[in-house]
């Protein structure tokens, strides 16, 4: 049976939630492999809207196993609130339907406080644009070998020792930022209180998933954010704190790279970005305003307005390469309805030199200007289209040109937030 990795191929907000939900109907297991609750996935099912941040998107589908892998950093208090919200919408969540890797690091209140204090202390132009939810500081603790993990909640003595080790680092840091020291006893008490709610979901996820693979079960690996926010291959330093590209799917849940059969890159038919950082095709005109309004471009997690711009084929070629994308799911094509002319970035001009990729150095990125190819738009609606025959000829030409420019085929085409409004070209789960 084929196993599929889903990754965002731009700066996030590409519509991963709908695509994962669409695919999850055919999967047996949906495993989240990186990120934290800074990610936001909106699902629309039979007119009901689900907004998920920490939970895998497949959790709203009955009869599936949802997994939070060790590559994720988890805020246990947020998770339990999210579970309560989703349960109130009629979704069953139990240890039989949701598992959390025992080695998953926990986001603590002090992580969020540190995150926000650092951002506030940063001068204009150096702010990263974090959500302030403690994602980065938690990943720092993981790499610094001072994180508190799910398994630590089971033993009071171990938990206290882990807290003491973490505070040896955090208290001096907080003092330098003018934040009061962490109340050790209160933190331990809060962790002990939440442990009874979290531990029933804890499991050796690596073992479970490898057993599922051997049994021929289909696994859908779900990523958060987008490949251009990858800590190594994104527009550093304006990136997230984890690896987002498809290779992380294996280490983020504990399976080998041979477990991955198909990589599906989610790609918006134009480009958006939230927060700071370079954005070569960003628009500050009526076209950009129209894209934002028609695409309802506001962050699911933060509500922040997204920056909008034309489709950037250069960036897509890069992310398709670094994630080994097999095929893309092109979303929000309907947002382009009614534009008389569409533009696609095919290269950059850097000080008179033509480049077919975005350079790594920040100063060079800032000087890159897009070289555009123009295409004729279409006036007919593509919203709700479920077959190629439903699409205007110019819309099909646009899709085909995107495929040529990024050197990667379209596997799925999404024409509205509704999961049924999807055109299947290539089945990612096909053996």
Image: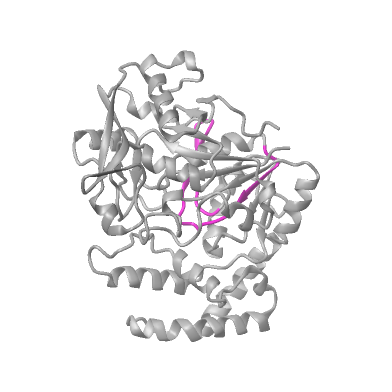
Up-down: is 125 above or below 330?
A: below
| Residue 374, quarter of the rendered image | top left
Image quarter where the C terminus lies is: top right
Q: Which residues are magenta?
A: 27-54
| Residue 384, quarter of the rendered image | top left
Image quarter where the N terminus lies is: top right
Residue 183, visible in the rendered structure: no
Specify whether 106 is left or right of 311. Answer: right
x, y percentage for residue 381? 36, 19
Q: Residue at x 60, y 52 (%)?
A: 249
x, y percentage for residue 150? 64, 68
Count of labels in the image: 0
Q: Nearer the viewer, residue 315 or 201?
A: 315
Q: Residue at x 24, y 62 (%)?
A: 125
Q: Nearer the viewer, residue 8 or 420?
A: 8
Q: Residue at x 33, y 27 (%)?
A: 336
Direction front: furthest residue: 353
Up-down: is 426 above or below 360?
A: above
Q: Is residue 30 magenta?
A: yes
x, y percentage for residue 26? 67, 34
């Amino acid at each position: 049976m084929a196993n599929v990795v889903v990754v965002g191929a731009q700066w996030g907000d590409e519509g991963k939630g709908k695509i994962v939900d669409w695919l999850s109907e055919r999967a047996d297991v949906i495993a989240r492999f990186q990120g934290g609750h800074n990610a936001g996935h909106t699902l629309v099912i039979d007119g009901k809207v689900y907004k998920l941040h920490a939970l895998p998107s497949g959790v709203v589908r009955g009869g599936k196993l949802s997994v939070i892998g060790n590559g994720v950093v988890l805020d246990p208090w947020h998770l339990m609130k999210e579970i309560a919200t989703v349960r109130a919408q009629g979704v069953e969540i139990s240890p039989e339907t949701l598992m959390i890797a025992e080695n998953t690091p926990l986001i603590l209140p002090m992580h969020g406080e540190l995150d926000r204090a650092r951002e506030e202390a940063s001068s204009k132009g150096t702010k990263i644009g974090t959500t302030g939810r403690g994602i980065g500081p938690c990943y720092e603790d993981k790499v610094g070998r001072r994180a508190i993990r799910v398994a630590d909640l089971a033993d009071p003595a171990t938990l206290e020792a882990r807290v003491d080790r973490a505070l040896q680092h955090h208290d001096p840091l907080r003092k330098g930022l003018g934040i009061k020291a962490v109340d050790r006893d209160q933190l331990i008490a809060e962790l002990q209180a939440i442990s009874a709610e979290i531990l029933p979901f804890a499991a050796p996820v690596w073992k479970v998933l490898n057993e599922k693979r051997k049994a021929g079960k289909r696994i859908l690996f779900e990523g958060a954010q987008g490949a251009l926010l990858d800590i190594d291959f994104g527009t550093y330093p304006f990136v997230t704190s984890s690896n987002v590209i498809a290779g992380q799917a294996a280490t983020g849940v504990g399976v080998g790279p041979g477990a991955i059969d198909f990589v599906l890159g989610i790609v918006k038919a134009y480009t958006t970005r939230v927060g700071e950082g370079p954005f070569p095709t960003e628009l500050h005109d009526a076209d950009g305003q129209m894209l934002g309004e028609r695409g309802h471009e506001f962050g699911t997690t933060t509500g922040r307005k997204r920056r909008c711009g034309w489709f950037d084929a250069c960036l897509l070629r890069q992310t398709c390469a670094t994630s080994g994308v097999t095929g893309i799911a092109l979303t929000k094509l309907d947002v382009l309805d009614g534009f008389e002319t569409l533009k696609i970035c095919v290269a950059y001009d850097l000080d008179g030199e033509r480049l077919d990729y975005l350079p790594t150095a920040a100063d060079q990125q800032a000087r890159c200007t897009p070289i555009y190819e123009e295409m004729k738009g279409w006036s007919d609606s593509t919203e709700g289209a479920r077959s190629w025959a439903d699409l205007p000829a110019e819309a099909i030409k646009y899709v085909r040109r995107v495929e040529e420019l990024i050197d990667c085929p379209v596997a799925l085409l999404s024409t509205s937030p509704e999961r049924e409004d999807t055109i299947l070209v290539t089945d990612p789960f096909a053996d």
